[in-house]
Image: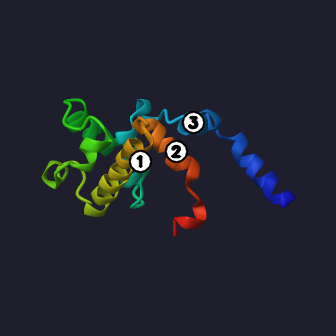
Amino acid sequence: MKDLLQLISVYMSRTTGIKEHCARCLRTERWNGSVVLMIVDAAFTSIGLNYFTAVVPRVMKFKEELVDCGKVRDVESLSNLPEEKTQSIWRNKRSWQAAKAIASYLYELGKREGLDERRAFRLWAANSRLEEWI
């Protein structure tokens, strides 16, 4: 165990900013605090493509084409987004199904608990158990 900790320490000492990045994630500050973009990011990342060359540019395209113009304002509008609006951005249907299902769940959770979407997202995360993800 001590050897593993030493090995991890060596690699962690080579990373800069990782602690701050993790803290920003835990405070739901990724993508300037946009839960919609965090959901889309996670859904795109879930299929295993390179994050910086595939996922980030497509999340930015989603933001430019659907968020910035107000077509997708919140998790409710993401959950109701028609499929034909998404295909030019990202063609993987499973990713969109996941994004829309997550958005729908967070919308319902927020409505039920009287929370905004960031608080609903954090409530879900705080109560999630890794063992139940499989």
CB contact under 8 Å: marks 1 and 2: yes
In percent of width and height, residue 100 lies at 30, 53
Q: Is residue 115 above or below residue 8?
A: above
Q: What amino acid does circle 2 point to?
A: Leu
- Sequence-first tag of 3 and 2: 3
Quarter of the image for residue 56 reads top left
Q: What amino acid does circle 1 point to?
A: Leu
CB contact under 8 Å: marks 1 and 3: no
Residue in the picture at 41% in, 51% down: 42
Q: Secondary structure at mark 2?
A: helix
Rendering colour mode: rainbow
- Sequence-first tag of 1 and 2: 1
Q: What amino acid does circle 3 point to?
A: His
Number of disc labels:
3
- Residues 39 and 132: in front is 132
Task: Check the image and name the residue furthest to the bottom.
Answer: 134
In percent of width and height, residue 118 lies at 44, 36
Does the image show residue 53? no
Residue that label 2 marks: 123
Residue that label 1 marks: 109
- Give the CA distance from mark 1 to mark 3: 26 Å
Q: Secondary structure at mark 3?
A: helix
Residue in the picture at 35% in, 45% down: 107
- Residues 9 and 97: in front is 97
Q: Is residue 75 above or below residue 82?
A: above
Residue that label 3 marks: 21
Does the image show residue 29? yes
- Give the CA distance from mark 1 to mark 2: 9 Å
Quick one: label 1, few (<14), some, or many (20+) residues within 10 Å?
A: some
Q: Nearer the viewer, mark 1 or mark 3?
A: 1
